[in-house]
Image: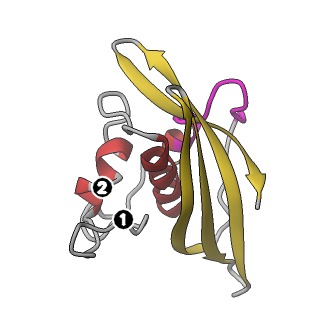
Amino acid sequence: MSTKPLSGPCPCGRTDQRARPLQYALCCGRYLEDFAGTPAPDAESLMRSRYTAFVREQADYLLASWHASTRPAALTFEPGTKWLGLDVRSRSVLDADHARVEFVARQRDAAGTASRLHERSNFQREPDGELQRWYYVDGEAG
């Protein structure tokens, strides 16, 4: 579990109708802090919450939200990486249980070198007990 604060603007950059940043607790925080009971309602929300989990270094959430068919055994984080922002380029619903989200995430490593991750991520929705839950399956570099 992350030791980062639960207040303040959400790292994913989602805004309200007045273009004000949503607070973490009202945005991705509700999914990261209660994965078992509050699934992300759509693929974009899951993708944004996964970005936030990378920012907060919450490997448990990332692994739990990764589809079992492609999930790695473990995750590590590069020390000193600073995530700088997320830009959702597009989202498409392929059918009731499959979706794709294209995004660019910016980061800076410990040496100060900036880079961008441009990906088209694939998501799949499956039953999880009484809930329907979206999972990250894989991605293609953009």
State which region is magenta: 62-73
Q: Which is nearer the N-term, disc 2 or disc 1?
A: 1
Q: Residue furthest right?
A: 141
In the image, residue 7 lies in the stretch drawn in magenta? no
Residue 50 horizontal side relative to residue 103, left or right: left
- Counting from the top left corner in percent of width and height, residue 23 is at 25, 65
- Residue 22, position in %: x, y? 26, 66
Q: Let me know if residue 81 appears in the view.
A: no
Q: Quadrant of residue 69?
A: top right
**Residue 14's mark?**
1
Q: Residue at x 30, y 70 (%)?
A: 9
Kindly report which numbered mark, 2 or 1, lies closer to the viewer in this rendering.
1
Q: Quadrant of residue 42?
A: top left
CB-based contact (under 8 Å), mark 2 and mark 1 = yes
Residue displayed at 70% across by 73% down: 116
User: In the depicted view, which residue is nearer to us: 122 or 76?
Assistant: 122
Residue at the (62%, 29%) spot, across then down: 67
Is residue 33 depicted above or below 53 in this figure? above
Nearer-the-camera pick, 15 or 129 = 15
The quadrant of the image that shows the C terminus is bottom right
- In the rendered image, residue 67 lying in the magenta stretch gets the answer yes
Would residue 127 appear left or right of 15 to someone viewing this image? right
Q: Amino acid at mark 2?
A: Cys
Residue 125 location, x and y as percent?
A: 51, 26
Secondary structure type for disc 1: loop
Task: Give 70 or 96, whichever is nearer the viewer.
Answer: 96
Residue extending farthest to the bottom is: 112
> Which residue is the site of mark 2?
27
